[in-house]
Image: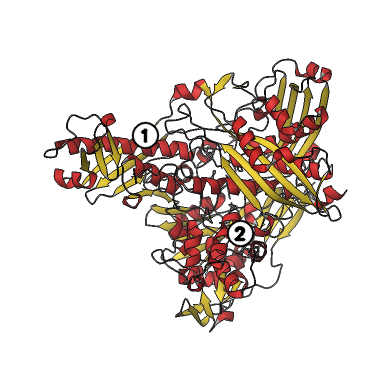
Amino acid sequence: MNTPTTQAALGQAAIAPPPPTSTVTLKINGVERHLQLAPWTSLLDALREYLDLTGTKKGCDHGQCGACTVLVDGKRINSCLTLAVMQEGADITTVEGLGTEDNLHPLQQAFVDHDAFQCGYCTPGQICSAVGLLTEGKAKTTAEIREMMSGNLCRCGAYTNIVSAIEEVLHSKNSELRR
Amino acid sequence: MSTTSYIGKPVNRVDGPAKVTGAAKYAAEFNVPHLAYGHIVSSSIAKGKITKIYADEILAIPGVLQVFSHENVPSLAWFDRSYKDDVAPGGSPFRPLQGNEVKYSMQPVALVVAETFELARYAAALLRIEYEVTKHDTDLETKRDDGFEPGRGKTGWVPPPKPRGNPDKELKNATHRVEGEYIHLAQHHNPMEMFASTVEFLGDKKLNIYDKTQGAFNSQQYVMKVFGLSKDEAHVVSQYTGGGFGSGLRPQYQLFMAVLAALELKRSVRVSMTRQQMFSMGHRPHTLQYVELGTNPDGSLAALHHHALHETSQFEDYTENVVNWSGMLYQCDNVKLTYQLAKIDVYTPQDMRAPGAATGSFALECAMDEMAYAAGIDPLEFRLRNYAERDQNLKREFSSKKLRECYHEGAAKFGWEKRNPEPRSMRDGDLLVGWGMATGVWDASIQKCAASATFTADGHLTVLSGTNDIGTGTYTIMTQIAAQTLGLPLEAVTFKLGDTNQPEAPLQGGSWTAASVGNAVKQVCDKLGEQLLKLAQKMEGSPLKGAAYEDVEFVNGQIRLNADINQAVVIRDILPASGKDKLEAENTMLPNPINQLKNSLHAHNAVFVEVKVDPELGTLHVTRVVNAVAAGRILNPKTARSQVLGSVVWGISMALMEESVMDHGFGRYMNHNYSEYHIPVSADIHDIDVIFVEEEDDKVNPLGIKGLGEVGLLGVAAAVANAAFHATGKRIRNLPVSIDKLLL
């Protein structure tokens, strides 16, 4: 027997017009960027779709995978779980702000040397998360690194090498390497 | 000493710097001008008909450009064959947005296109759709008696061999006999990158298509056939792919959607799936297996029966090789292998890393462990006693098989001889310790592949082949092969892939890429080398005059005589001296059919696993893994090790975590997101040792490569389950091995 049903994720509420945009100023990798954004734009989408900073990845858009990890005032956050308008005036660092192909950040270099990735899609998030981890200064042991890097999924399963790469930088005698 | 000898060296990934800086661009990251965004609407029902779509309501929102559904999609290709891709199974491929019928939950039923991503998503969430719901059936358990033997399967599927000997009688007469049913639910690939296509509209019908795929050519063929485009109009690019694991073998529906919208709106369009939607595009099928083994008094296998039944969709007969491996992994003269499908209301399953083998080896290798216990023999000794010296399925010799060495080297590294066979006998403080092992086997295959090479007067070599690099290291190993073949430093070589304007390469899958593309690259570089030698011989006072290609070597930037290495020409000098700007070569590598048909070509592995179980809580951790792999020549031990490390993580994941749980009331996977579909995180992964056993093989292909994408995964799930048995005395045949099952 067939029964009728209706689909609409937002239910039968009256259709509201899209929200208006306003000027948002974001300080990203040391540069002030002025954008016209609606309040519903996440920081992640602002980076990827409005600023062409596609190094920050979208893996779930729900704060479940960590691929979108960036540093806001030095702290690692999931950029899909914050709205761009909420970060006005904050100091945002993305993977593009850490180093370049010719001048890699020590963690980026360690990730290459330890082959700490395969497909590379979770990698910018892993690296930003690792920068945040080193800044926090809480992780001292391998087990602590593993625990405190567990917000960043890697489906290729590169965890062994990710942890080795982070350990190398953590234990590096040259504190400059941990900039 | 050769400094340009790169094959077999642990070279860093050449694409590494691009990946760690975010410079590597994936399909959804090409921000072409004037881009519109499409958001896919998925059906809320599992079966029935769409009766009305209220598109007008959302088209009234400023900035919403179009709603595509079966109501307005133009007539496209008519015949099924136009929708069949390279690896389509038998049946009728699903055609998105064509017809009002809903065949499975979360079927794409509409595409909302708008000026911004946020607006498209908002409008898609508001779209009202009315359905007539028909009763669905998504439960394989109710289909146990409805199994059927598939007809023609997809490319690469081999029906089980006919029974040999008298398995029924020998099972009855066996000294020891075990039997059991093995079950796992559907599993989803879940690559980190969500499926996306960015279609750049270049006017008329000309498109640049940036697609997430494991094969740009497969996507191109599909788009050409469905939309009636030429090769030139459907240019597909896929230079970086954020993981595949098989999910990108078939063109996915966002590709259809994005191309449709771009052609209709005459505008560039991007369509990305959500993580939830990635549970609506193929999966490892829910499979029920039955294994029965019998042994003779001397511990040799008397008979073996392996049966598998798995789900497929109502419209395609997905097939994979589940049971065949059981007929060739061990010596056994009485074997019965049977394989069936059953149709339920889901989307068609799809190849997922080591398709079929991951499933089959889990059942067989757990049964082997159980049999070893029943016969009172150590599980490793039991396998050695039943070692297959030749492939009894194909009745052929192995081109090479170093599985025995895998057993010995793996066991030595792991310390297997210290194992007390008694379950629950080993402890670490309060924790129960379990040691288990298992074996795996996978095909070493090779496909036809083309490549081109260009050497320019500045001394740079560029090699092209339209393959893919889903994280496997293709960029790097091809650069190594090309550089070594022509004796050039790595920095002087660029390998490019993932573009349909390049010479055609097969899909990246089946562990055949290293062999197929690798041998193609080697051949085309040799062809270029012959041209370089001829030009070098024409140089004034050339010491190479009269030398055949076999008489010289390309090393350290020079061509030099084998007989006297001081007689050499600098390769960089050749083109300037001859007045040419560049040299080019193109070639299609064809596998040697005689070697392919004469031998059994396989890679093997042996896996040893330690688990620790808290007897009070039932929590289980895999604390140590040794995976010994014999897979022919290892081109780059660094990237190869990463592949096997990843495979071990996949095996642990399969054993302990992964299951797509169907709510049969809704006919939908309940845990369709990354927080409820569990995969390991960093804290779940402990010590993993990878051993590559030396294995030379000049029959499998000229470079002796067997491929590594799948073999490392095999045996891991079974070894974990076997270790769990050793730790707890509980034989769990229903994956995942979870706390509840360990405590019950």
Q: Is residue A130 above or below residue B384?
A: below
Near mark 2 (Cα within 10 A), the count class, few <14, some 14-19 or many ≥20, is some
Q: Which residue is mark 1?
A: B588
SS at mark 2 in the image: loop
Nearer to the camera, B492 or A72: B492
Q: Earlier in the sequence, mark 2 or mark 1?
A: 2
Q: Which residue is mark 2?
A: B274
Q: CA distance from mark 2 to mark 1?
A: 39 Å
- Amino acid found under the numbered disc labelled 2: Thr
Residue B415 in percent (x, y) is at 69, 41
Residue A110 in percent (x, y) is at 50, 61
Q: Is residue A124 above or below residue B99?
A: below
> The disc numbered 1 marks a residue on which chain?
B
Query: What colour-coding does the image apply?
Result: secondary structure
Residue B36 in percent (x, y) is at 48, 64
Could you tell me which residue is drawn at 57 percent across and 67 percent down? A130
Can residue B150 be seen here? The reply is no
Q: Residue furthest right?
A: B744
Nearer to the camera, B739 or B6: B6
Could you tell me which residue is drawn at 28 percent across and 29 percent down? B550
Q: Is residue B183 above or below residue A75?
A: above
